[in-house]
Structures are given as C-alpha cells and as structure tokens.
Image: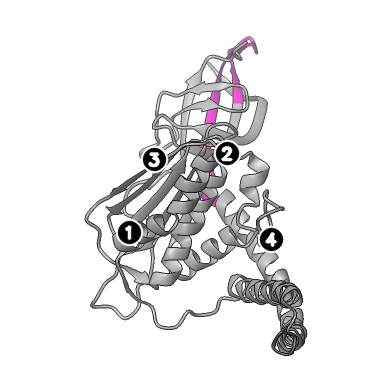
Amino acid sequence: MFTTGGTKIHAEGRYVRKDGVTVWGALTASTVTNESGEPEHCVVMVEDITERRLAEREMVHLERLRALGDMARGVAHNFNNILVGVLGYAQIIQMKSKDASIKEDLQSIVDSALRAKDLVQRLNRTVRDEGEGTLGLVEVAKVINDAVGRARPRWKDEARARGANIDLEIVVDDLPAVRGTESRLHDIVSNLLFNAIDALPKGGAISIEAAAVREWVQIRVRDNGVGMDERTRSRLFDPFFTTKAEVGTGLGLSTVHATVRRWNGTIAVDSAPGKGSTFTIRLPVWKATEEKTTATDPESSSPKTKISSFASSEGFSLASSNWIPQSMPNPRWSCSRISATRPP
C-alpha cells in the first residue's frame, strides 16, 4: 500500500520539450511512501504555463505603454511647438546669412530638430493605438526583397569596410498577401534586419525566411550573433529600451511590436547569449471576401503539445512516462512516476 502527501516541491522554470521548444512549466512533486513510511518514489506533475506567463508579460508591457502614452500626450504638443520655433528661426537665418560656415552650422540645427520631430511622431505611433489609414493587400515577398536591397550598404558594404563579412540568405515561398501597409511592413523587416546586423560586429550569417503556415504568413529573421540574456529579452519591446545607446533610440522594436499587434499578428523572440537571435512574426493572410480580418491564436487549430519530457535549465531533469488522464478534455499537464533521486 502506498500513500501520498509527503514532501512536496513546487517550482516554476523554463524547460525544453522533446521537440526543442522552450516553454514555461510549473512543476509539482510529491513523495509516495510505502507502509513503513519510507519514500518509495515520487509523483510529478508539470503544467504548461507558457500562455499565462506570456499574458502576464503582455499586461506589464501594456501598463508601461499606457503610462508612456499619458506622458507622450502631455509633452508632444508643447514639444512640437518648441521645435517649430527652432526650425523657423534657423531656416530664416539660413536664408539671410551669406556665410557658408554659418549656413552649415544652421543646417546641423535644422537636421537635429527634424530628427527630434520624427522621434516624437514615432513615439506617438508607438504608444497610441492609432490607425495607419486604409489597410490593404501587401505582397510580403516583394517587401522583403526590397528591404534587403535597400539595406545592402549596411549588411554588405559597411560590414566589409570594417573587416567583417555577413552572409545573408533569403528563403521566401510562394506567399499569399497579408493585410497591412507596404511602408510599415518594410519598416518591420528593416528593423529586424538592422538589429541582426548590429548583433554581428565580427560578421556572421543572417537568414530571412517567409512561409505560409495555415492561416498565417510567417516571417522569421535569424542571426548567429551575440544573442541576448533574459533581462534584455524581457524588455526588448519597451519604448526607449536599447542596448545601443550611442546610435539607437529604443523605438525600433517597440514600433514593430505595436504595428504587428494592430494587424492582429504575433511576434516572438528566441535568443541566448552567444547563440544568436530568432524573431518570428505571424500575420493573418489577407481574405478578400472579408473587410476585416480577425486573427486567432496560430496554435488554436491544433491540440496543445503536452509536456512530457524536459531538459531543465534550472539544474534537474525530468523523464516522463507520458501518461495523460483520458477523462480530461484538452489536458494541460502530464504526470508520471519517476525515481526519487536528483541527478548529481
């Protein structure tokens, strides 16, 4: 006769499934004792809490955006008024002055003011859920090829000039169109490509893949560069967060995130220090018979993969017998009996 209810352990951590996908799991372990009260084995339950973790992270991100939105609405109008004064007087002096060196200095003032104006506009687009005009049919393959072509000076010429070599591979299937705007999708691809280039200071490889995945068009940008730690990944889409303070504004990826969400798409990143980064975007396929495409969870059309075997980054391993209670519809956890020993 065996009884449960002995020592219990509860822990949450990141695990790697059999198929190589990293997920969040909540592990609960309880010892099972024999008639003598001695531990015989343990029962382990692991629940896939990835969706909960992602929802919590999204809520935190939205709260930050709301706070930033309140601030942006309060300062954007006044700041633009200040910029109008700076630009106006600088341009008037430019027209009146005949000194070439003064005109050159004034042009620097004008250029800086215009960049500041653009920064305010980008901030407003990021923190406000504002429309972009009429969304229409966008050919993804055309936009990707155009963005890569325009970025050629960055990923080829500049890289070679500093003694680095970047190999760029494009794999694009015959794709359906998506619902959006060509200019914004161009910005999305360019931002992801520039981030990949910046992650390869000594050169490396970048791949851009696009394929149809059920009712979605999936765009994946992958590099084998320096990668990111968990702290950086958790703040990656926050406005003004940047690891390139000397050259970046911290609005590129936050703008990408906001645009993808407005288009009812999803964006995810997988990265680790020294192992490169992979950004995956999914956008709904354009449906000509519908005025508005409503996105659904890209995984909802197939059963959830049950967590049955892990290689844990927390320092222990779990081998499961892959037993799933048949009485539970769409169960989210698996349970198994394992030896009550920890690996060395």
Residue at horizontal 74%, vertical 83%? 90
What secondary structure prevails in the magenta region?
strand
Q: Amino acid at mark 3?
A: Thr
Residue 118 left/right relative to 220: right
Where's residue 193, x and y in %?
Answer: 47, 51
The vertical placement of 275 against 219, above or below, is above
Q: Which residue is mark 3?
A: 305
Marked residue nearer the N-terminal end (2 or 1): 2
Depth check: give the residue in front, 263 or 198: 198
Q: Which residue is mark 2?
A: 201
Residue at horizontal 64%, vertical 11%? 38
Q: CA distance from mark 1 to mark 4?
A: 30 Å
Residues under numbered marks 3 and 2 in contact, where contact means CB atoms less than 8 Å apart = no
Where's residue 103, x and y in %?
Answer: 72, 78
Mark toward the viewer: 3 or 2: 2
Q: CA distance from mark 4 to mark 2?
A: 22 Å
Mark 1 secondary-structure assignment:
strand
Marked residue nearer the N-terminal end (4 or 3): 4
Q: Is residue 44 magenta?
A: yes
Depth check: give the residue in front, 120 or 11: 120
Please tell me in which quadrant of the rendered image residue 168 appears: top left
Residue at horizontal 42%, vertical 43%? 331
Q: Which residue is mark 4?
A: 240
Q: Amino acid at mark 2?
A: Pro
Marked residue nearer the N-terminal end (1 or 4): 1
Q: CA distance from mark 3 to mark 2?
A: 38 Å
Residues under numbered marks 2 and 1 in contact, where contact means CB atoms less than 8 Å apart = no
Residue 119 left/right relative to 337: right
Q: Is residue 6 magenta?
A: no
Q: Which residue is mark 1?
A: 216
Q: Amino acid at mark 4?
A: Phe
